[in-house]
């Protein structure tokens, strides 16, 4: 189990090779990569549990285990680092729902992404062939492009495969969806998946986010850990400890000056909290570069305890781990643009997950949980609960009658929960083209201070639970300052 408070802290002074600040999936990943080489590593975590954006808790009622941040983990399943770790031995079990994501429309039809590409295409009617043409080659070439999609910018090992992906990826999702698909269900489906980018869908590289998330549904699946996101964080923490790593929870680092002496310090922090603990040590130019880093839209999150499953109008939605509620491509695009421009959409695009349909361990018998969020302007203080519930009722009439408990997190609550989520931005920085490959600065994982690294989702490849930011930051530290 992680140790708490600073008696442990004192014991480890002068005894470690590397210190990691923050135990999110990237912090734990970085610590594991360093511990795998036999070096001593210690992780300090402000919260009283490990996991950062990968934690679960009884947010509504006793016995209802909700995910506080991340709920569905497509990139964790395909992550080259996580795949290489014995996480099952440490209690991780992936649950794969029959449908990865369902996207209902007002006319009653539902577009679904299955793990099977053929089944997905077959249900898209006249867009079936276009879906196969788009995702068939991409899915087959995933082993050749995964390093580029889940890594920093560098010359790809398979330039032709990567160029085929990149040429589409660097487009706005709206343009790609309209060009490739002739009808609404397929267009809306791709638009909804691309909206995970938290950017207006007429901006590049939203197509890239949509394509990558859609194709990993076929390669690995939009899976979630049995018991909730916390099970993944616990498995990573347990593996780290089995390698000799130490985790100290309930310890907020106020300044890098108070850390044990170590050759490498890796901060699982986005630029704003990083500046708070290390800003006084950075040269003014680097400080200014971090201050210029752009955070994006916020999220308004709601969890429900329900006395039964969600009464979807179309039963196909009850087979899906994730449901996208926002109607047509144009509706979703309008809602995302409004949030980006500082307005609150009357009909926000809502991302919903319903894990207890496939993992009954997370609620009392016969009861269920649901997890949603919608995008709102950065730092928004507006109550979006009625609008979110209206969107669910639109496709599941009678939903509100099933509610027995609710927990809301506005952007300020998210930031209080985790300092990285500035203004409620769950991506730790906007994923605009300018910040996609050079996050948070052109130095990516490095800083001007020798031995001080950034390993959070504010570095490439960015948002999501995959640990690859931590992996690449740790590799850099191992090459530069932990060589002997
Ligand atoms: C509401 C929400 C929903 C999301 N949904 C998904 C999803 O479904 N799928 C997905 O893949 N991703 C999702 N994400 C994104 C995902 O959670 C993040 O991309 C991921 O957690 C980033 O990991 P990280 O290790 O970089 O940082 P974090 O997870 O942010 O971890 C940073 C850690 O550092 C700690 N910390 C901060 N300051 C200090 C300090 N001074 N001293 C000590 N510790 C400190 C924090 O407490 C935290 O534990 C979601 C995020 C949110 C907020």
Image: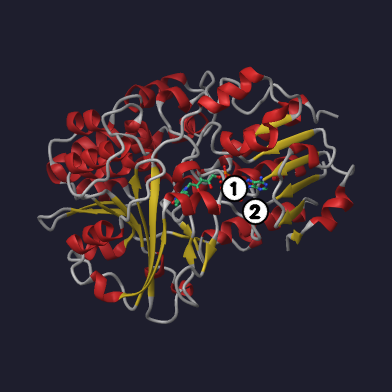
Give the mark toward the camera: 2 or 1: 1
Q: Would you identify the image quadrant in which residue 99 lies?
A: bottom left
User: Residues under labels 2 and 1: Cα distance?
Assistant: 8 Å
Residue in the picture at 76% in, 41% down: 19
Label total for image:
2
Vertical relation: 63 (above or below) 415: below
Give the image location of residue 23, x and y in percent: 65, 49
Give the image location of residue 263, x and y in percent: 82, 33
- Label 1 sits on a secondary structure element that is helix
User: Outermost residue toward the bottom?
Assistant: 365
The label on residue 25 is 1
Residue on which the image places disc 2 = 236
Q: Would you identify the image quadrant in which residue 237 lies?
A: bottom right
Query: Can residue 21 be seen from the camera position used here?
Result: yes
- Left or right of 354 in this view: 388: left
Residue in the picture at 56% in, 60% down: 230
Q: Residues within 10 Å of mark 1 (few under 14, many from 20)?
A: many
- Label 2 sits on a secondary structure element that is helix
> Viewer-proximal residue, 383 or 402?
383
Residue in the picture at 73% in, 63% down: 1
Give the image location of residue 160, x and y in percent: 42, 20
Q: Ligand 1 closer than 8 Å to the CB at disc 1?
A: yes
Vertical relation: 22 (above or below) 460: below
> Viewer-proximal residue, 119 or 177?
177
State the quadrant of the C terminus.
top right
Query: Can residue 37 be seen from the camera position used here?
Result: no
> Viewer-proximal residue, 249 or 328?
249
Q: Are marks 2 and 1 in contact (CB under 8 Å)?
A: yes
Residue in the picture at 25% in, 75% down: 401
Q: Which circle's residue, 2 or 1, is located before the other in the chain?
A: 1
């Amino acid at each position: 189990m992680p140790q708490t408070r600073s008696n442990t802290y004192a014991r480890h002074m002068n005894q470690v090779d590397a210190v990691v600040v923050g135990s999110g999936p990237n912090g734990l990943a970085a610590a594991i990569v360093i511990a795998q080489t036999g070096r001593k590593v210690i992780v300090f975590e402000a919260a009283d549990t490990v996991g950062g954006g990968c934690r679960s808790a009884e947010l509504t009622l006793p016995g209802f285990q909700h995910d506080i941040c991340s709920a569905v983990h497509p990139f964790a399943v395909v992550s080259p680092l996580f795949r290489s770790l014995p996480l099952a031995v440490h209690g991780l079990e992936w649950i794969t729902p029959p449908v990865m994501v369902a996207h209902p429309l007002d006319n009653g039809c539902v577009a679904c992404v299955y793990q099977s590409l053929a089944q997905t295409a077959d249900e898209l009617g006249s867009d079936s062939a276009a879906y196969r043409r788009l995702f068939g080659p991409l899915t087959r070439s995933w082993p050749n492009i995964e390093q580029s999609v889940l890594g920093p910018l560098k010359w790809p090992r398979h330039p032709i495969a990567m160029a085929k992906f990149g040429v589409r990826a660097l487009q706005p999702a709206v343009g790609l969806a309209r060009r490739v698909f002739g009808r609404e269900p397929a267009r809306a489906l791709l638009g909804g998946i691309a909206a995970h980018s938290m950017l207006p869908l007429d901006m590049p590289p939203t197509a890239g986010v949509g394509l990558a998330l859609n194709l990993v549904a076929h390669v690995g699946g939009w899976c979630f850990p049995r018991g909730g996101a916390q099970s993944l964080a616990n498995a990573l923490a347990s593996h780290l400890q089995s390698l000799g790593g130490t985790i100290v929870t309930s310890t907020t680092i106020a300044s890098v000056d108070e850390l044990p002496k170590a050759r490498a310090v890796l901060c699982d922090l986005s630029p704003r909290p990083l500046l708070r603990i290390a800003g006084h040590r950075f040269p003014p130019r680097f400080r200014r570069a971090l201050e210029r880093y752009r955070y994006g839209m916020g999220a308004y999150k709601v969890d429900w305890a329900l006395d039964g499953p969600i009464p979807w109008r179309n039963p196909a939605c009850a087979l899906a781990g994730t449901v996208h509620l926002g109607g047509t491509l144009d509706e979703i695009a309008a809602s995302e643009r409004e949030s980006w421009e500082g307005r609150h959409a009357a009909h926000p695009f809502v991302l919903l997950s319903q894990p207890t349909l496939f993992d009954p361990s997370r609620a009392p018998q016969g009861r269920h949980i649901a997890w949603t969020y919608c995008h709102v302007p950065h730092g928004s203080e507006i109550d979006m609960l009625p609008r979110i519930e209206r969107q669910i009722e639109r496709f599941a009439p009678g939903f509100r009658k099933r509610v027995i408990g609710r927990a809301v997190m506005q952007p300020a609550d998210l930031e209080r929960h985790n300092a990285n989520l500035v203004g409620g931005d769950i991506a730790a920085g906007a994923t605009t083209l300018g910040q996609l490959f050079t996050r948070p600065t052109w130095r990516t994982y490095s800083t001007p201070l020798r031995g001080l690294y950034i390993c959070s989702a504010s570095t490439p490849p960015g948002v999501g639970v995959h640990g690859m930011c931590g992996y690449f930051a740790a590799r850099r530290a191992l090459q530069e300052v932990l060589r002997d």
